[in-house]
Image (tube, grey):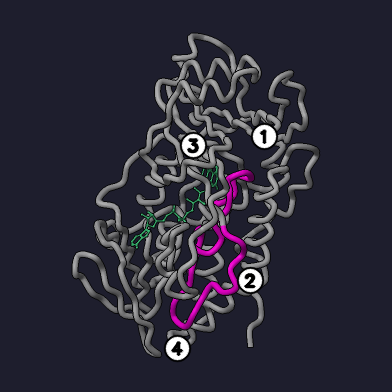
Amino acid sequence: MSTIAIIGAGIGGLTAAALLQRRGHDVHVYEQAKQFARVGAGIQQSANAMRVLRAIGLEERLRSIAFQPASWNNREWDTGTVKYELPLGEVFEQRYGAPYLLLHRGDLHAALFSAVDPARVHLDMQLTGLESLPDGVNLRFANGHECRADAVIGADGVHSLIREWMLGREEPRFTGRVAYRTTFKASLLGGYAIDDCTKWWGPDRHIVIYYITPNRDEVYFVTSLPEPEWRNESWSARGDLGQLRAAFAGFHPQVQAVLEACPEVYKWALYERDPLPQWSKGRVALLGDACHPMVPYMAQGAATAIEDAAVLARCLDEAGEAAIPRAFQRFEATRKARASEIQLTSHRNQWMSKPTAADWVYGYDAWTMPLADVA
Ligand SMILES: Cc1cc2nc3c(=O)[nH]c(=O)nc-3n(C[C@H](O)[C@H](O)[C@H](O)COP(=O)(O)OP(=O)(O)OC[C@H]3O[C@@H](n4cnc5c(N)ncnc54)[C@H](O)[C@@H]3O)c2cc1C
């Protein structure tokens, strides 16, 4: 089996590592962070992602720590009039054969980490350069470490160095919008009742609020707010609560109550790219946000990265060691149209604002989807 280096231990990189290790590949993951932190963020995992996580053996663990709401509600920002309510819970599960879960992003990451060999996840390893040769790829890291692999998967996120190596330097596009987000104890609401899971749609801004634990004791919210001057992208940058509350003045009392109750908030500039012309080159392939970063308005960025990992594993299954470039081309040819469609649909930010045909997103099965033919 081939030696595979995965750059980035985010959600996409760890999913790929877990799947490839189970298939017998010699996988090493290189991550620039010195440690992992459980930063305040929630994440939605729909059936298309859950079918992949099921194959890694994580379904029961995730069900036990996640919240499974009865519906995903969409309401007008001020009156609270329901625009569209997507049934989740058992109705969703019967339709798609897997659940729709809401959980802490750190808990999902920890579950994925538990599914890989920890001795093969190398922290404090920032990739600084690579050289692709006909029979392998040489990698160089900021700390002086060098190594060689048969294949490299660039799961290094929206600012991917490997994307830059493949396609040249081009900054992702700042959308002029900022996501404020945090998780906090539901007890801080002082008994005030809020919906289980709702997106509140304002004229030029929105906020999504949901519980992330089975017993509803932890709440999460994430906004999208115009703030063209602020471009910082850091999981730990603090936001100003007064400014945030003022930005949502006039929103429904539930929104006000949540923003009043939350003790701190983080902010994250939202970047995106247009679909890339190329996802792979020789023995190097991109995966997840590295090749299809998107605004989070469909809650599908991580789910799409997870789907990528499953299809990539299938393509590598069918290739011998000599055929890695072909496997990567096949991966790209199988995945690009779908990922691009999700990127563009997210960009429009109308998903679920009215009755929405969702089967093409949630019904996708990365395990049975036919792999594309490549010459
Ligand atoms: C506000 C917000 C809310 C979201 N909500 C959802 C949701 O509900 N559901 C959903 O599915 N998705 C959601 N997403 C999208 C999701 O977070 C991303 O799409 C997902 O994290 C992408 O995973 P990834 O593994 O491709 O990249 P990342 O998670 O960004 O991981 C990349 C990793 O690579 C490492 N790295 C980068 N450069 C190097 C280097 N040179 N050397 C070594 N390591 C490197 C980074 O440190 C990082 O750990 C949301 C995103 C945002 C911003």
At mark 1, the secondary structure is: loop
Asked whether mark 2 lies closer than 8 Å to ligand 1, one says no
Return the x and y of residue 313 as percentages of the image width and height.
Answer: 50, 69
**Residue annotated with mark 4:** 322
**Residue annotated with mark 1:** 204
Discs 2, 4 touching: Cβ within 8 Å: no
Discs 3, 1 touching: Cβ within 8 Å: no
Q: How many marks?
A: 4
Q: How would you rate the neighbour count of disc 4 (Cα within 10 Å): few for under 14, some for 14-19, many for 20 or more? A: few
Q: Nearer the viewer, mark 1 or mark 4?
A: 1
**Residue annotated with mark 2:** 334
Q: Nearer the viewer, mark 2 or mark 4?
A: 2
At mark 3, the secondary structure is: strand
Q: Main secondary structure of the magenta part?
A: loop
* 297 horizontally vs 132: left or right: right
Which of the marked residues, 2 or 4, is nearer the chain's N terminus? 4
Q: Nearer the viewer, residue 96 or 232?
A: 232
Q: Residue at x 63, y 88 (%)?
A: 375
**Residue annotated with mark 3:** 42
Which of the marked residues, 2 or 1, is nearer the chain's N terminus? 1
Question: Label 1, label 4: how many angstroms apart (C-alpha)?
Answer: 52 Å
Q: Residue at x 54, y 36 (%)?
A: 102
Which of the marked residues, 1 or 4, is nearer the chain's N terminus? 1
What amino acid is labelled 1 in the image? Asp
Q: Nearer the viewer, mark 3 or mark 1?
A: 1
Which of the marked residues, 3 or 2, is nearer the chain's N terminus? 3
Q: How would you rate the neighbour count of disc 2 (Cα within 10 Å): few for under 14, some for 14-19, many for 20 or more? A: many
Region rendered in magenta: 273-301
Residue 242, visible in the rendered structure: yes
What amino acid is labelled 4 in the image? Ala
